Amino acid sequence: MKRKPAVAGKFYPSSPSKLAEQVGSYIRENAAKENVTGVVSPHAGLIYSGQVAGAVFSKIIFPHTFILIGPNHTGIGSPVSIMSSGEWQMPTGSLSIDEGLAKKIVKLSPVIQEDPMAHEMEHSLEVQLPFILYYSSVVRIVPVLMMYDSLETCRSVGEAIARAVADSEYPVTLIASSDMSHYVTDSAARAIDRKAIDRVLAVDPEGLYETVVKERISMCGFMPVTAMLFAARKLGAQKGELVKYMTSAEVSGDYDYVVGYAGMIIK
């Protein structure tokens, strides 16, 4: 099955040359690269969040496979859905799904269901791919989407993924796709986002979940990030690093009504 781009021409240019040029402008060519267990990367239109995503992908040594975990904005499909075969096409290339690893995750998880339809129109994972393709078209991917659910669902998903990764014979990196606060003032976003960021950097999935719920932080991918942190912790990760934080105000000039973007690595 070939999954075609859903938001080309909207979130990023549909022209291969223009997309490559835009992504290249966000890449930090001289960044020191390191092996990481997990990544948090935003998923807005590239003009808004591309600087943050570019900074993150510039810092990591690429694995054999990326497991991408993102929020399901469309409401289509299973509560936790995986696409375990085929390829994702983009203007600048295509990426094949790691079928063996995807199928292993499904076997290990009681909540992750095979559901390609859930992925057809969802943008949260798609907008990561231009940055991956900037560096490699041979790396494999495993796409997973999550709807809003419980802390225990995040734990179940994360621990199943961790078991599959631990059993793998090659390097695997986890990417959690999330934006931060939505539609508050710039100062409010920075203050409240810091509370969530601190829990991510502490590799504290329970703390992140509780903080987002208690503080009512409109972090759209907090469940994917929570699941990623459960997996990363089980795989031995001990600390995080904030690579870049910004808000949409830095692009739009509107400081009254912003979205926050944070790029982090977990190691």
Image (tube, rainbow, N blue to C red):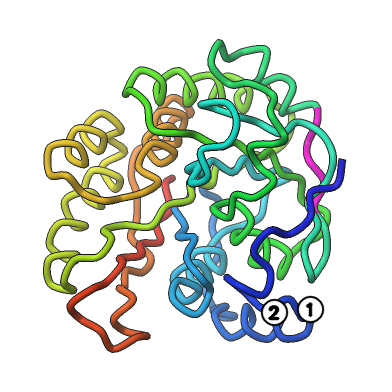
Residue 121 picture location, percent across and down: 64, 50
For numbered disc 1, what is the local secondary structure?
helix
The answer to whether residue 97 is magenta is yes
Give the secondary structure at mark 2.
Answer: helix
Q: Which mark is residue 19?
A: 2
Question: Residue at point 42% right, 47% down?
Answer: 266
Disc 1 marks a residue whose amino acid type is Pro
8 or 266: nearer the viewer: 8
Q: Position of residue 95 (x, y in %)?
A: 80, 52
Q: Which of 72 and 87 is in front in this view?
A: 72
Q: Which of 237 and 119 is in front in this view?
A: 119
Quadrant of the drawing holding the N terminus: top right
In this picture, residue 202 sits left or right of residue 195: right
The residue to which callout 1 is attached is 16
Q: Pick the quarter of the image with the C terminus.
A: top left
Q: What stretch is highlighted in magenta?
A: 95-99
Which residue is painted at 57% across and 26% down in the image? 78
**Residue 117 location, x and y as percent?**
70, 36
Bin the neighbour count of mark 1 within 10 Å (Cα to Cα): few under 14, some 14-19, many 20 and up: some
Residue name at image x 19 percent, y 32 percent: 210
Marks 1 & 2, CB-CB < 8 Å contact: yes
**Horizontal placement of 13 versus 97: left or right?**
left
* Residue 266, placed above or below residue 79: below
User: Could you tell me if residue 37 is visible in this image?
Assistant: no
